[in-house]
Amino acid sequence: MCGIIGYSGFREVKEILIEGLKKLEYRGYDSAGISIINENLKIYKEIGDIGKLVNKIPNLKGNIGIGHTRWATHGKVNKINAHPQISCNNKIAVVHNGVIENFEILRDKLKSKGHKFKSKTDTEVITHLIENYYKGNLEDAVFSALEQIKGSYAIVVLCEDEPEKIVGVRNENPLIIGIGDNENFIASDVPAILDYTNRVMYLEDGDTAVITKTGIKVRSNGKTVERKEHTILWNLERKYYG
């Protein structure tokens, strides 16, 4: 099913991403990766269990990042196909759950514009689309990319040029926001963030969320909307499965 975790706040993000991915292991995966902004965008990916990824990551500082556990659909199991996927200019990183139905058509169009593809994934198309539309506002670029995409997805995006911001989008794949004090989270499921907050917001299909350490903005159909905050009353010791 794949797992997603993202964080913007005051804590060291590396540990939050790794622990969040471990909490999502129940979803199944064959590779894992993280992206952190530390002066510039850095990505680390490995095949196999999360422990192998941990051993490859240096003592990296940073307060914003995204992570992913992948269960292969398009493209075989290897480091190149693992997420995050990155743009040609190495400034935009994307993690994605779901299936992009028209990715081959989009990939051919982007190649004709000079984009260079490294993986065999449908996710990489999203990354290059956002890069193609990026004019200084990540949210606008994501909106423009989504107009071209057909399929189901939970997408989370990080951009070196906007190092305080994470953009997340949901369509037929779960995505939740964890609400903290001077920190916020985005994830596939509640266990990934429950060590840090029990306040969550469930995104709905068609929602786009912009997350910084101090704020959350959700839009649907071009309009800002309010999504109800929920308090999670169970803890990890009681297990997610009830």
Image (cartoon, grey):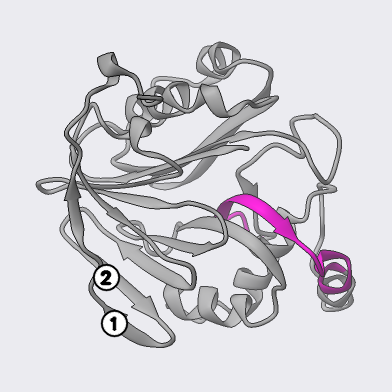
Precedes in sequence: disc 1 or disc 2? 2
Queried whether the magenta region covers residue 92, the answer comes back as: yes
Seen in the picture, residue 145 relative to 74 is either above or below; the reply is below
**Quadrant location of the C terminus?**
top left
| Residue at 58%, 82% in the rendered image | 144
Q: CA distance from mark 1 to mark 2?
A: 7 Å
The answer to the question of whether label 1 and label 2 lie on touching residues, with beta carbons closer than 8 A, is: yes
Q: Amino acid at mark 1?
A: Thr
**Disc 1 packing (10 Å; few <14; some 14–19; many ≥20):** few
The segment highlighted magenta reads 89-107
Queried whether the magenta region covers residue 231, the answer comes back as: no
The location of residue 136, given as percent across then percent down, is 44, 78
* Residue denoted by label 1: 224
- The image quarter in which residue 194 lies: top left
The circle on residue 97 is none
* Residue denoted by label 2: 217
| Residue at 38%, 64% in the rendered image | 162
Seen in the picture, residue 25 relative to 210 is either above or below; the reply is above
Name the element at disc 2.
strand
- The image quarter in which residue 168 lies: bottom left
